[in-house]
Amino acid sequence: MQFPRYDLRVELSIRQIITFFYMELPKRFWTPGESHDFWEMAYVDNGYLEIIRGTQRHALGPGDLIFYAPNEFHAGRALNESAPTLIILSFECDSEAMHACAGKIVHLEEEEKKLLSTIIREGREAFDPPVDSPRMHRPRQRLKAAFGSEQMIKNHLEILLIQLIRRGDRSSTNQSDSIAMANYNDTLVGQMIDYMRANIRENLTIEQLCSAFGMGRTRMVTLFKTATGLGTIAYFQKLKIEHAKTIIRHRTLRMTEVAEEVGFASVHHFSRSFKKETGLTPTEYARSVNARALRWSPEMYPELN
């Protein structure tokens, strides 16, 4: 008896991969950018990465995955002094369904991370050198690869893509991306402030800060103003005065020494800046009720204990 056959519908198929890496990048990683005629996805396993795509910037952290469509220009750099660990996999796929991934950034769920882990495990088995080797440039068959390892890569990659396409909602993707960028901006401004505190005795310039954080002047000024309501140098001067107030309350120093502690070359300049910020000269502040009340309250400044 002849039984009828049912042909399974294939929505998405991958038969070729171009690159497959699991790599740790240096803290100062930066790439001027590229474009190519195939799909690529990049997953951040650890660390932080900034991606420039057209006129847009995207901040990616652990668990984030980004797709680059064929011929889409993209560049990137490491963020937050981290050495990001990435999974980069590029492939040929002419399925119409892949259009749903164009421009997409997603945060992987646990089931999707397990699929990606399996793909990495099979990539170690299938190729020589393995995908996590610094010597890996292009996939090359391993002579004693485990049976079906390349097919496992194909199958699990297709399953991962299908699951991500099923998620679909671009609006939630964009919202997630906006939240990630806002969190990144807050973190970056916090690091700038920490850097200022660590260099409180210096007279930092915007150029020095731009160099330290690898960004342009306009972006730094805008970022800092948005987060703090103050200009970058104005905020630094405010930090200096706040630090001077703490010194006056907790240490017995001459005002010339206090001025030196916060990076003022002249006690007169220090006094003018202090009064502009507080309404009092440093000496008047030292004699004030507020300063005397706080002088013996180390619990308010535990970092000085």
Image (cartoon, rainbow, N blue to C red):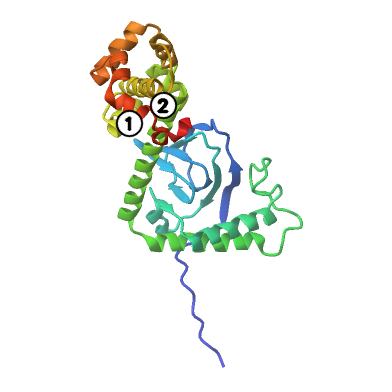
Location of residue 259 in the rendering, given as x and y in whole percent from the top left corner: 39, 12
Q: Earlier in the sequence, mark 2 or mark 1?
A: 2
Q: Residue at x 32, y 50 (%)?
A: 175
Q: Residues within 10 Å of mark 2 (few under 14, many from 20)?
A: few
> Looking at this view, is 227 or 243 the one in front?
243
**SS at mark 1 in the image:** helix
The type of residue carrying mark 1 is Leu
Q: Quadrant of residue 185?
A: top left
Amino acid tagged 2: Met
Give the side of residue 102 with respect to residue 92, left or right: left
Residue to which mark 1 is pinned = 223
- Residue shown at the point (30%, 18%) measured from the top left: 287
Residue behind mark 2: 215
Does residue 99 appear anywhere in the picture?
Answer: yes
| Residue toward you, 168 or 259 | 259
Q: Give coordinates of residue 50: x percent, y percent.
A: 44, 38
